[in-house]
Image (spheres, grey):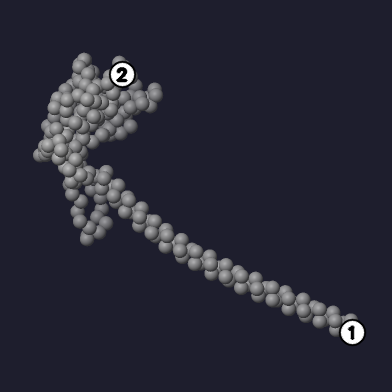
Amino acid sequence: MDEHQSMADDGDAIDDSSGKEIATAEGSSEMEPYVGMEFESEEAAKVFYDAYATSLGFIMRVDAFRRSMRDGKVVWRRLVCNKEGFRKLRPKRSENRKPRAITREGCKAMIVVKKEKTGKWVVTRFVKEHNHPLVVTPANGRRSMLLSQTPDEKDVKIRELTAELQRERKRSAAYQEQLDIVLREMEEHSSHLSRNIDDIIQSVKDIESKRLAVSNS
């Protein structure tokens, strides 16, 4: 199967799988992934690894993928810990801004799944170890944990872009208000000029009429 990588790869070769056990979206979250594990679909693999992540105490992030060169469909996917990689360093915009919390620590934990010719999605790589503490919470407390988690870079970026969008909207509204004032002034000035021109034309007509009257007398 021809494959095309549309996002960053992990640089490691993908091994063929010969496992026959198939996991579904309803599979046990306490089961540990293993190379050769099969799923009915990519979504089933995501659901399984997300449940596994929750049971261990970390958050899954959907990462790189590859598409088939034949039909453009995703045929390879990497699912990682949300602390994978490192945050890109960017120039400081202001000394007064609070430093952003470190949300990526270079964690290597992941699974890689690949779609086989049979249509099954097979685990071709599994890295279990994390380089940071895991926080396990009861099932009824997981929602609270997720809500209180420090957001990763994507969430922070969304908030930054939203704030920037609001600022641009306010600036756009201010410019629009200034433009409306200028247009009103131009319209008033144009009306004033039109009245002056009408007065001048009328004066010219009056003078012309008087001149003709004098000529005919």
In which quadrant will I find the N terminus? top left
Q: Position of residue 91 (x, y in %)?
A: 25, 53
**Neighbour class for label 2 at 10 Å: few (<14), some, many (≥20)?**
few
Q: For the point 12% across and 37% down, which residue is it?
A: 138
Which residue position holds label 2? 119
Looking at the picture, which amino acid does disc 1 mark?
Ser
Q: Quick one: 58 or 17, which is closer to the camera? A: 58
Q: Residue at x 25, y 59 (%)?
A: 94
Is residue 40 in view from this perspective? Answer: yes
Q: Tell me the amino acid under the disc marked 2.
A: Gly
Q: Earlier in the sequence, mark 2 or mark 1?
A: 2
Secondary-structure class at tag 2 = loop
Residue 109 seen: no
State which quadrant residue 26 falls in. Answer: top left
Q: Which of the labelled discs sits on residue 208, or is there none?
A: none
Q: Is residue 175 above or below residue 200?
A: above
**Along the horizontal axis of the image, is 44 left or right of 129?**
right
Q: CA distance from mark 2 to mark 1?
A: 109 Å
Q: Is residue 34 above or below residue 53?
A: above
Residue 53 pos. (x, y %): 17, 33
Mark 2 in CB contact with mark 1 (< 8 angstroms)? no
Q: Which residue is mark 1?
A: 217
Position of 55 relative to 96 (above/below): above
Q: Residue at x 46, y 61 (%)?
A: 176
Q: Is residue 70 left or right of residue 58?
A: right
Please report the residue visible at 57 percent of the width from the left and 67 percent of the height from the top: 187
- Foreground residue, 23 or 132? 23
For label 1, the crowd category at 10 Å Cα-Cα, with few meaning under 14, some 14 to 19 and many 20 or more, is few
Find numbered disc 1 in the image and state the secondary structure of the residue it sits on.
Answer: loop
- Residue 44: give x, y in percent of width and height: 26, 26
